[in-house]
Image: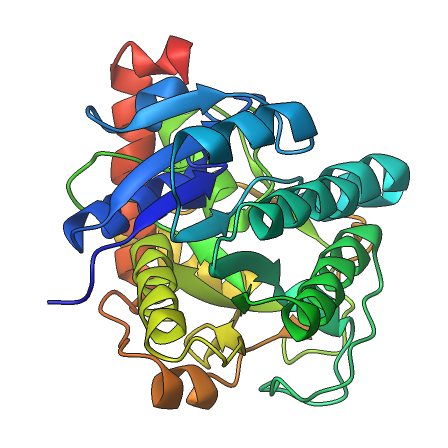
Amino acid sequence: MRDAATVLVTGGAGYIGSHAVLALRAAGHAVVVLDDLSTGHAGAVPQGVALVRGDVGDAGLLAGVFRDTAFDAVMHFAGSIIVPESVRDPLGYYRNNTAASRTLVAAAVAAGVPHFVFSSTAAVYGEPASVPIREDAPLLPINPYGRSKLMTEWMLADTAAAFPINYAALRYFNVAGADLAGRSGQSGPVATHLIKLAVQAVIGTRDHIDVFGADYPTPDGTCVRDYVHVSDLADAHVAALAALMAAPRRSLTLNIGYGRGYSVREVLDAVDRVVGAPLDRRPAPRRPGDPPALVADNHAALATLDWRPRHDRLETMIADALRWERHLADSSLAQTY
């Protein structure tokens, strides 16, 4: 069994963070969640896990959190993640994703935390010259979301060179699905991810699905993305922590994806197959900041981490997301989530 760690999970009441909490606990680690609940939900934090409500940019709060508990690692998921919103509100994204991360990293260093796992993004690559994308591809983000995340990657690299802390920056692609046991799923107040929007259309909480742009330089004219199941992604974070603990002087920057891209139309065709009926699809203008294709080269992650995808069928991700969406609609969670 891997060495047990005590981990502070920021954003641990959110979609990806809550799944990471479940995976950490399954691996035998102790967890404390820090979340301001602006997009996360207290109900997503498992019973027995302490929840500290607050902002990761609050230096005074962080000092108290690190004083109260001796953490072995931080997993940092807190932040803003909507690309078009980042174009409209760049300063908000630099505040939430970069300035707040700087405050968190400084507090972790001051407390002597040796390991840091960072939720980064494929948006750091911008519009890649070729796909699949390797980690050494040029970093040319085309939106404030990607730039704000890249700045934090740079900050972590400089910090690790100056202080006794190592880090893993996990650049992941489009996240989908939900916990197989129904304990968590994507429940944020603003839905922007394609599969989430599609399953909402299936159950009738929206009346159609928009196809944003049909003139991209892709085989069918719609954006192509590499979709990764949220439970596989959570497992990758646990594996990254184990790798950091095993080699305290080594830091990692890794893509987390499956290496297979699906266009918007292919995803919607798969939704039709899962539910046995066609969705109402409507053409819409391109969204600002969307690159044509993002597909991971995941060879480095497979070679470096004790991690293998277990839920990599597109239909599996759709079915899991649909089951969670029906759960939300059929329960009191529809009001509280």
Q: Return the residue nearer the eye: 326 or 150.
A: 150
Taking the image as shown, residue 26 lies to the left or right of residue 252, namely left
Compared to 127, does 318 lie above or below?
Answer: above
Residue at the spot x=36%, y=46% of the render? 7
Q: Is residue 169 visible?
A: no
Taking the image as shown, residue 264 lies to the left or right of residue 337, namely right
* Residue 197, x across and y down, in percent: 51, 39
* Residue 43, x across and y down, in percent: 32, 20
Residue at the spot x=48%, y=32% of the render? 67
Where residue 245 sits, quadrant-wise, is: bottom left
* Residue 167, x across and y down, in percent: 53, 67
Q: Return the residue nearer the eye: 77 or 81.
A: 77
Classify the position of the C terminus by image quarter.
top left
Residue at the spot x=52%, y=53% of the render? 112
Taking the image as shown, residue 329 lies to the left or right of residue 88, namely left
* Residue 309, x across and y down, in percent: 28, 72
Q: Say how the picture is coloured.
A: rainbow
Where residue 100 sits, quadrant-wise, is: top right
Classify the position of the N terminus by image quarter.
bottom left
Number of marks drawn: 0
Q: Is residue 165 visible?
A: yes
